Image (cartoon, rainbow, N blue to C red):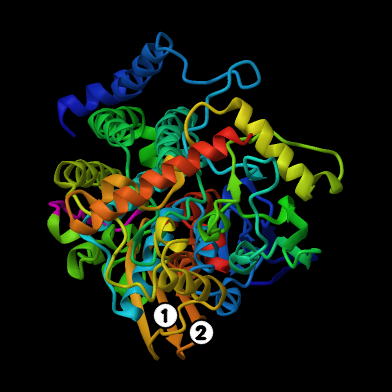
Amino acid sequence: MPEQKGKLRKKELTINMGPQHPATHGVLRLELDIDGETVVKCTPHVGYLHRGTEKLGENRTYLAALPLTDRLDYISSMANNVGYCLAVERLFGIEAPERAKFIRTMASEMARISSHLLWLGTHALDIGAMTVFLYAFKEREWILDLFEMLTGARLTVTYPRIGGVRNDVSEEFLSSLYKFTDEFPKNIEEYETLIDQNRIWLQRTKNIGIITAEEAVNWGLTGPMLRGSGVDYDLRKYCPYDAYDKVDFDVPLGKNGDTYDRYRCRMEEMRQSARIIRQCIEKLPEGPVMTPDAPKFTLPPKERILKDMEAMIQHFVLVIKGPVTAPDGEIYSAIEAPKGELGFYFISNGTGKPYRMRLRSPSFIHASVLPLLCEGALVADVIANIGTIDIVLGECDR
Amino acid sequence: MGLRKIINKVLMLEILKGMALTFKALFRRPVTRQYPKYKREPFGGFRGLHALTRRPDGDATCVGCGLCAAICPSKCIKVRTTTGPDHKKIVKQYEVEVLRCLYCGLCVEACPYKAVVLTDIYEYSGFTREEFLMTKDKLLANWDRFAESRKKSYFARFWRPLLSDFKGSAEQAALKDLSKAQRHKDIYIEAGR
């Protein structure tokens, strides 16, 4: 609102927040028009981390494109891997064995805990509570160690495979994970002691960034962003994949749809995740971890390659050309990733590579809701809002 | 506002609670490792620096089929072969551009001979890009370095179907025999360092 008053002109100040800003969690750029301390207009600019994952996926075989999905939401790469493998399995019409399903469920819940811990730490750090950051990273380190024990890598796991998982779990891993689920709820209580009732935390989060249930649905929000507004929608419950229909868990819901409710939602989700992991370990069935029924789509066991001509031919074809017997058609398959609904859309034309790979990433959709949250709010709350939508730009820009 | 809330507000009880927790944490055992002094052993199956295994006679196990190069998502493996005097395939060149590698381990999974492996060596740094272009000799040297320091069997962890995957079935018994042979092969890789 440019205003003439004598010789002094008054107008909004346009500032760029990011792409190199410690609170934007990556390379998000916000163009803010501010009037004093109030944000008048907020325009998010994305694309600084664009690597062309979708296009790369079209040029890799189904198996070789799997490591690309690690780099989408690099905090919870396991969930992306599971989503990718699940989509391809549904496209091929194969199914992972029971044991692999339980292992995947367990691993994706580990990813959820790891992702939410990082969110909690950085969100609290942005708002001004440093201790939580240090405490949360202690447990995250444990989870990452467990990932290393399971997969051989801490962050970019590349663990699930089309038709199962790469290797079986060890007793050492299971006992360590079980111990983790024992101790983790106590740790959550610690974080809550630090910030749950803290007056600064309450002032910075309560009634900040309110999204009503209707708005949340209209904007296409998913995950804790939607559940914080009180909409009961969780893919793990409503179209269960892997072993989610065999474990018992609750879906925490918020009420007001403000930053504090979303914080409560995520904290509760971590508790539920620990509960799911616990049940998965207790119910873990015996059996193979790679489906034996789909030799056309899964690499044969290494023992057989040099003994069995069929297996050798299959191995060479699968590695060099990909699963060339893949059926034609298209599929959309989604999972409940820690950030929200992560969808994979494939068009297959019967070659070893997808004709089109499209990702529905929750971070991109959540980044688009920033103007709604920020406009009319204070500049300081922009930080809280970026924290609460919990975006990862690797997934947003793909 | 109830009396309790007022007392909470005036005495800052919730902040005191938090302070008490941080004070307690002072007496806990530190979780930080002083890295260069103390090093955590990587877990079995860690995906680190590449290596080429050796046959018992000391040569590289690699036969030059090029499957690792075919499956590599970042196309960082280069294999060139020629034909030797007795019509045998000779691996002339085997290069891994380590700086472009994703460490996904798909090359290890694709290799039928267990020739290329990812070792648990994770400390390697250099000043030039050339140092990270792993030629065949460098990769064999990596294997020697890894084999010397190795305590656990590498393949037991990395391999896709562990023996326990097939408990009880008939196919299982057949595979078990096969894997006995496999175990011999593992030992022979070990012996061939």
Q: Residue at x 55, y 64 (%)?
A: A68
Separation (CA) of disc 2 from disc 1: 8 Å
**In contact (CB < 8 Å): disc 2 and disc 1:** yes
- The percent coordinates of residue B118 (x first, y second) are 59, 45
Give the amino acid type for the residue marked by disc 1 in the picture.
Answer: Tyr
Is residue B168 visible in this depiction of the protein?
Answer: yes
Which residue does the image show at 41% across and 46% down from the upper left? B181
- Can you identify the residue that label 1 sits on? A345
Question: Is residue B132 a member of the stretch shown in magenta?
Answer: no
Which image quarter: residue A274? top left
The spot of residue A264 in percent (x, y) is 28, 46
Q: Nearer the viewer, residue A40 or A372?
A: A372
Residue located at (43% from left, 47% from top): B182
Residue A261 seen from this side:
no
Q: Are marks 2 and 1 on the same chain?
A: yes
Label drawn at residue B176: none
Horizontally, residue B1 falls left or right of residue B27, namely left
Q: Is residue B76 above or below residue A185?
A: below
Protein chain holding label 2: A
> Which dot marks residue A356?
2
Farthest top residue? Answer: B27
**Is A276 located above or below residue B84 in the figure?**
above
The chief SS type of the magenta part is loop
Characterize the local packing of mark 1: few (<14), some (14-19) or many (20 or more) Cα atoms within 10 angstroms.
many
Q: Quadrant of residue A281?
A: top left
Of B89 and A387, the residue lying toward us: B89
Please state, as top left, top right, bottom left or bottom right, where the N terminus of chain A lies in the image.
bottom right
Residue nearer the viewer, A310 or A25: A310
Q: Which residues are magenta?
A: A247-258
